[in-house]
Image (spheres, rainbow, N blue to C red):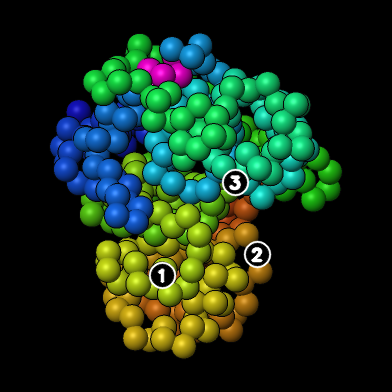
Amino acid sequence: MTFQDLLNQDFGTLSELVRIHARDQGGAPAMIQDDRTVSYAELDALMDRVAGSLQRAGVESGGVLAISASTSIEYGLVFLGALRAGVAVAPLAPSSTADSLAMMIGDCGAKILFLDAGVAEVLEPAAGKVTAVRVSLDDTGAGTAFSGWLAATGATPSPVTVEPTQAFNIIYSSGTTGAPKGIVQSHLMRWQHVRYTERGLGCTSLISTGLYSNTTLVSFFPTIAAGGAVLLMAKFDVARFLSLSERYGVTHAMLVPVQYKRIMDYPDFDRFDLSSFQMKFCTSAPFSAELKADVLKRWPGGLTEYYGMTEGGGGCPTVCNLSGWSWANSTQPPPPSVMP
């Protein structure tokens, strides 16, 4: 089966798409961070090792794991490997309080918590409330070292059948009106999302917001689904963002308004070659007309703004242009040209 054949089906999985990309373009980059690159062949094999490790630990299909850590290749590997095992992922904001983290870990029923040293320090005051086994993504004393937890090279998991209604991930709300609440998104919802992506082979998406956020995931997953490369930034920095964009020929990026403001105000912005950009996305906060106009005037490529709720995975896209914008019908799947 080809990549396009699978995308044309009413239901499939991201795991299957990765397997096809590993077969057809195994040497192509899937994830890049600093001086590290993981190819699609390597990603496919590592997903098997993560899935096998979860099964060995007794986390069965339909179970849940939690991740709370800075953005990293290991973070992406665990997320994608869990999906291959049929395990739902609850990505939790590292900026949460200790009590909030403990509550969310208990609420989702995660058997394993993947974390790093920074989150371990934050969690310490409520450590006694967390029963999940800890695995340290950065191989620190925060838990069992990920490198040691991971199954040996060549390990393969027992095959699982993922149902369309099965939980893909659990995104916790901000809790601005009370305690954070888990929002369950199904494999079918994510499949419909990636089916309509306009990205193709060779695309490169620069990820500069946390992987715990649906704002980020609606850019991360379509890129992997399309066989493109995700370029990961653990922490946003304007100069580095622009430098990476130029160096890697970035084609797509999802940013929030404050990031756009900082980028457009950067004194050396116009010195960078950003001609590779095809589309930029924005959501999560008010985006002023003045700032949009500046982005459209000085930054090559299109601009799409999203308004919606985490429960929907995406929302109602606004395709911006110099003369105004047009609202897509949010009750129907958006056309490919406006999908992230």
* Residue behind mark 1: 240
Category of crowding for the residue at label 3, using alpha-carbon neighbours closer than 10 angstroms: few (below 14), some (14–19), many (at least 20): some
Residue at the far front: name it.
141
Q: Nearer the viewer, mark 2 or mark 1?
A: 1
Magenta stretch, overall SS:
helix
Q: Amino acid at mark 1?
A: Arg
The structure residue drawn at horizontal position 45% and vertical position 19%, both measured from the top left corner, is 54
Q: Which mark is residue 290?
A: none
Q: Amino acid at mark 3?
A: Gly
2 or 3: tag closer to the N-terminus: 3
Separation of residues labelled 1 and 3 (CA atoms): 22 Å
Q: Is residue 20 magenta?
A: no
1 or 3: tag closer to the N-terminus: 3
The structure residue drawn at horizontal position 24% and vertical position 20%, both measured from the top left corner, is 154
The structure residue drawn at horizontal position 41% and vertical position 19%, both measured from the top left corner, is 53
Residues drawn in magenta: 51-55
* Residue behind mark 2: 285
Separation of residues labelled 2 and 3 (CA atoms): 27 Å
The relative height of residue 272 versus residue 117 in the rendered view (above or below) is: below
| Nearer to us in this view, 161 or 236 | 236
* Residue behind mark 3: 118
Location of residue 86 in the rendering, given as x and y in whole percent from the top left corner: 46, 21
Category of crowding for the residue at label 1, using alpha-carbon neighbours closer than 10 angstroms: few (below 14), some (14–19), many (at least 20): few
The structure residue drawn at horizontal position 27% and vertical position 48%, both measured from the top left corner, is 37
Q: Amino acid at mark 2?
A: Ala
Q: Is residue 84 something that shows in the picture?
A: no
Q: How many marks?
A: 3
Location of residue 284 in the rendering, given as x and y in whole percent from the top left corner: 62, 59
SS of the residue under disc 3: helix
Q: Quadrant of residue 30?
A: top left
SS of the residue under disc 2: loop
